[in-house]
Amino acid sequence: MNAPIPFVVNPDYRFAREWLAALQREMPGERIVPLNELDTAAKAESTFAIVINPLPEDIRQLPRLAWVHSVWAGVERLVTDLADTDLKIVRLVDPQLADTMAEAVLAWTMFLHRDMPLYAAQQREHIWMPLEYTRAQAKTIALLGLGALGEAAARRLLDAGFNVCGWSRTRKTLAGVECFAGESELPAMLAKADILICLLPLTAGTNDLLNAETLGHVPSGASLINFARGPIISDHALRACLDNGHIKHAVLDVFSVEPLPPDAWQWAHPDVTVLPHISAPTDCRTASAIIAQNINRYRETGQIPESVDRARGY
């Protein structure tokens, strides 16, 4: 019988039981056991674990651990917390996640494209005034990030009739998308944006990427959507751009501190829509099936699934 698989979950996470049940359904031949239910011998035997935002001290209870499988696509917290280890980190790569994100990108792009923030403001003031309509073909949506999420989002936006351009760290080629790459080409891409959408992973290279200087390249009156990570955008610079009208409206789903504190300026700003990190929730059913496939292959071959490049951060 295989050794039990440690399930290492941050104690603050609310849905551990649901994940455990979904994972166990997909792996009926395995025993997936919460860390605190494993005895010393089982902990000493474990070479891999399934993790959800684990505490570093909990990981240290597994001395033979070689790799961990995160249930999330974003792993910046794991990379930081496990920086002093040689552990391989495997992140979730789930096509369903990309499809869910693409759906959110299209929905909130339409929210901005069809002037919903302005109509909501008019409603509050009891103003009945139709605004001039602009066709989707007359607007350019600029995507920061052309990985799996960016590619799926680009396809949805193209199907809806928008012009689409995108930027990535390394050169990409996507049909129908004007692609930019590298630091030197970022200003030119930003300058095309009617709506700028951030889908980048948080790394040392993307932290504070959108700051006073780079936001200055965005056309005056453009809007912004952040579905990536809060620290990629400078809060101070964004607030200044919103206050002076350089950025017309911002849809923010992610923040440097989450949950967003009650006294945070974003709550009350008239040109900000606050979302509680809901743009692309992981589907535990499809994710569990993918994790099960990765673990089954590891059991059969001994090969660790493709892991995160620590230098890149993803």
Image: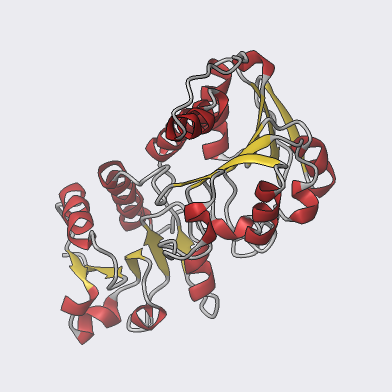
Where 90 falls versus 176 (above or below)? below
Q: Which residue is drawn at 33% across and 67% down?
A: 49
Q: Which residue is drawn at 53% across and 59% down?
A: 265
Instruction: Report the label total.
Output: 0
Which residue appears farthest toward the right when viewing the image? 184
Q: Which residue is drawn at 70% across and 35% down?
A: 221
**Left or right side of 87 for 136:** right
Residue 299: percent from the left, percent from the top?
31, 57
Which residue appears farthest toward the bottom when viewing the image? 40
Q: Residue at x 67, y 21 (%)?
A: 139
Q: Which sits in the foreground, 70 or 13?
A: 13
Work out whether residue 138 can be spotted: yes
**Left or right side of 168 for 103:** left
Quadrant for the C terminus in the image: bottom right
Quadrant for the N terminus in the image: bottom left
Work out whether residue 306 can be spotted: no
Where 224 falls versus 173 (above or below)? below
Residue 124 is drawn in which quadrant? top left
Where 170 falls versus 88 (above or below)? above
Tell me how the rendering is colored: secondary structure
Q: Which sits in the foreground, 29 or 278?
A: 278
Residue 9: percent from the left, percent from the top?
29, 69
Residue 182: percent from the left, percent from the top?
78, 46
**Left or right side of 83 for 20:** left
Residue 93: percent from the left, percent from the top?
44, 45
